[in-house]
Amino acid sequence: MSAIIIVSAAGCEQRNDSPQNDSPQNAESGITISSDGAWMHDGLEIRRCSEIYGYDKLTQAGQMAFDLMYGEYYPEAENNTFLLPTLISADEFYRARALYQAATLRYKHLPWGYMIYTGPAKKTDTIHIDRNVSYDPEITVKQYNETKGKAVEIASAMPPGFTDKEKCLYIAEHLVQNVRYNKERLRFETDIGEITVSAQTGQRTTTYAALIEGEANCVGYSAAFAALAYEAGINCIIVSGKVGENGHAWNMVQIDGDWYHIDATWMDNNGKLDETYFMVDDQQISKTHEPVSYAGCPFVPLPASGPSFYSSQSAS
C-alpha cells in the first residue's frame, strides 16, 4: 500500500517522463532502480538527490520523500496529492522535510510547502498533508519566479571556464556591488479596533530582497549567495550562527571535496570587496563567528572545514 503525500501547486524541475524497462528492482521497497541510481515511480524517472548535504542521514523512505519534494515532480497533482512507493513514519517524513527546508532556504518563502497529519502509530500507510504557504500565494509565486529568473541570469553571465573558487568570488563580488546591507526590517502599522499595532516583516531576509530590491541583511545575503551558487553548480549550504550576542548567517561551499566558509555580508565593506572572510576554515571563522546549525536542520551537523584554502594552496 502506498503512502499519500498532499502537496500544493509548484514549479516542476528535473522531470523525466521516459520509463526504463530494463532496470533492476529494489527488493525492500519494490521500486525499480536504474543503472545511474535513479528510481522509477509512477512512470517517472526520479533523480536521487544524493549530492545534497545530509541526504545520507535519511532512511530510504525519507530519501524517497525528499527526492519527490526537492524535484517537484507533481506540481499539479489531482487533489494536491502524490504517492510514495513505501510506508513512511512521521519521524522519517519530518526529518526529510527539515532537510528539504534547509536545502531550499536559498528561496526562503517558497510558493508551496508540505505538511502531514498522522495518528499515534509510528508507521502509517496513508499520510495526509495540508498546504503550508505562509504568504499570499499569488505574490509569493510571482516573487519566486522573478527571483529564480534573476539568479539564472546572473549565474549565466559568468565568464566560461571559471573554476568553482572563481565562481564563488564572482558571486560574492556581485552581491557586494549590487546589494546594500540593511539590518532594519520593514515595519508596518495596522489598526485592530482602537489599537494601532506596529509589527515587523522579514522581507530583508530573502533572496528576492537581495537580487531584486537590492537591500538585504545577512540572511538575505546568504540566501542569495546560495541561490547563485546552486545555479552555478556549486554545492552550498547556509549556516545559522552567532557573532557575539547577535544572530548571523553565512555560507559554506564544497570545492574539490573540501568545505569552506564564505561570509558575503562581511565581504561587503561599504561596497568594496574584502576577501578576509572568503573561503576560510573552521579555525579562522571561529575567531569571530560561532556556527550553530545547518540552516536550522536539527539532525545534520555542519561539515568540518580545514585547513584553509590559502594555506593548502601555498603548501602545494
Image: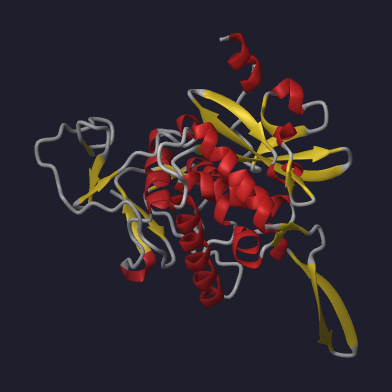
Horizontal and vertical percent position of residue 149: 46, 62
Q: Residue at the left extreme?
A: 22
Residue for point 49% across, 34% down: 164
The image shows residue 234 at horizontal and vertical percentages of: 48, 38
Q: Please, is residue 229 above or below residue 208 in the view?
A: above
Name the foreground residue: 188 vs 277. 277
Q: Residue furthest top?
A: 315
Closer to the camera, 241 or 225? 225
Q: Quadrant of the C terminus?
A: top right
Above or below residue 267? Residue 155 is below
The image quadrant of residue 213 is: bottom right
Task: Name the residue: 80% across, 39% down.
Answer: 242
Q: Quadrant of residue 126?
A: bottom left
Q: Number of labelled discs?
A: 0
In the depicted structure, whether residue 153 falls above or below residue 250? below
Between 156 and 26, the one nearer to me in the picture = 156
Percent across and percent down for residue 49 are: 39, 39
How are the residues colored?
A: secondary structure
Q: Residue at x 53, y 50 (%)?
A: 227
- Looking at the image, residue 28 sits to the left or right of residue 243; the answer is left
Left or right of residue 253: residue 123: left
| Residue 131 is at least partly visible in this image | no
User: Where residue 98 appears, x then y in whole percent?
Assistant: 56, 45
- The answer to whether residue 145 is seen in the rendering is yes
